[in-house]
Amino acid sequence: MTALRTRIAGLIAASGPISVADYMALCLFDPTDGYYTTREPFGVEGDFTTAPEVSQMFGELVAVWLYAAWQAAGSPTGATLAEIGPGRGTLMKDVLRVLQKLDGAFVAGASIALVETSPKLRGVQKQTLASSGIRIDWHDTVSTLPTAPLFIVGNELFDAIPTRQFVRIGAAWHERAVGLNETGELGFVAGPATIETALLPVAAATAPEGAIFEFAPARTGTMEQIATHLATFGGAGLFFDYGHVEPGIGDTLQALRKHHYDDVLANPGEADLTSHVDFAALALAARAHGLHAHLATQGAFLLAMGLLERAGKFGADADAAGREKIRGEVERLAGPDAMGTLFKVLAVAPRGTRIPFPAVS
């Protein structure tokens, strides 16, 4: 039993069940015992591995895209280059290394920023990026970034922003909550709050009893904040995550601990909680603010950006074991049975900015 689980149980006993979104927020971001505020979860020694940790090729291709997007926007001086949810700082480290080779003037004239709320992870990021020799500023939110053209990337950001869940009971969809069962253990219950029919996807009409619908206004709120900045000052954004391109019905809430799935309610604060991202909702939020929004699978995007060519260049100087390692990295990043299909990428930019992209939705 974790310390946070004891506190959550006490909160529920005193005030009643809490929403799934509130439960996620406590598990991930509680100032004392939250998952992201108390640990470094990335890599082999952590609980999961992200694309930048799989291979430097991921960050290198992201850098190429950011440079092309900057050029498409007219190569504005004084731009901001930012990452939101930067993990250990590995992606930004690779991006800066490549951009300095492509055009040192771009990096020299830009403000480099990381949007990160976790003091623990900020410390890790500072260590990762210490050798870059570049000034980097940290921000809690997008709203405090400089009032300048913004070129921003986010990898596995939105899946960790809490989602609400609704369960079908009869003709109504009631908000799913976390309560206590007869033995005092955490369990899912249906709360009194319901959701407007207009917010449900078409599939909800024929969904069976007990079906789950996930609704994440906090995620679209984050995209709206980014879109507002881009619409006002210019720039472009690129976001990778796992999820779906059309809204649907289903329970995708999951917990990861030591690279294995865990019970969502078993270890609050000691397991990563995520759910699949509704990319259609994010794209709609961006378009509502006057941006173009482009969607593709991660595999299609990376292949179009030159993943195989980059891997071939690495492989030319490697021995047999090295080439096999590179092949495995390519398969993991872009293969249909790995990240290639499950992970999607969303690119956004003001209308008229012709950013590179392999597929347009």
Image (cartoon, helix red, strand yellow):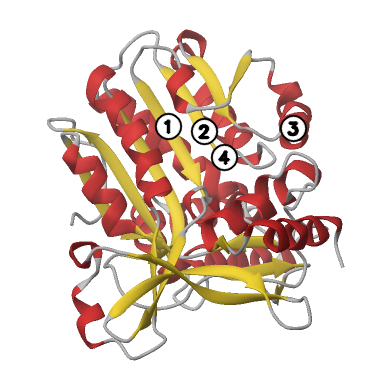
Q: Residue 152 carries which label?
A: 1
Q: Residue 248 carries which label?
A: none
Amino acid type assigned to the residue bearing label 1 in the image: Ile
Q: What distance separates the C-alpha of mark 2 from that of mark 1?
A: 5 Å
Q: What distance separates the C-alpha of mark 3 from that of mark 4?
A: 15 Å
Numbered disc 4: secondary structure:
loop
Disc 3 crowd rating (10 Å Cα; few below 14, some 14-19, many 20+) is some
Q: Cβ–Cβ below 8 Å for labels 4 and 2?
A: yes
Q: How many labels does the image show?
A: 4
Q: Which mark is residue 85?
A: 4
Q: In which quarter of the image is the N terminus?
A: bottom right
Q: Which of marks 4 and 1 is nearer the N terminus?
A: 4
Q: Earlier in the sequence, mark 2 or mark 3?
A: 2
Amino acid type assigned to the residue bearing label 2 in the image: Glu
Q: Earlier in the sequence, mark 3 or mark 1?
A: 3
Q: Earlier in the sequence, mark 3 or mark 4?
A: 4
Disc 2 crowd rating (10 Å Cα; few below 14, some 14-19, many 20+) is many
In the rendered image, the residue lying farthest to the bottom is: 208
Q: What distance separates the C-alpha of mark 2 from that of mark 3?
A: 14 Å
Q: Which residue lies under the disc numbered 3?
A: 128
Residue at position x 39%, y 72% from top?
Answer: 174
Query: Is 2 or 351 nearer to us in this picture?
Result: 2
Residue at position x 75%, y 53% from top?
Answer: 41
Label 3 vs label 4, nearer the camera = 4
Numbered disc 2: secondary structure:
strand
Residue 270 in view of the camera? no
Q: Residue 83 carries which label?
A: 2
Q: What distance separates the C-alpha of mark 4 from that of mark 2?
A: 6 Å
Query: Is 243 or 44 nearer to us in this picture?
Result: 243
Disc 4 crowd rating (10 Å Cα; few below 14, some 14-19, many 20+) is many
Q: In which quarter of the image is the C terminus?
A: bottom left
Amino acid type assigned to the residue bearing label 3 in the image: Thr
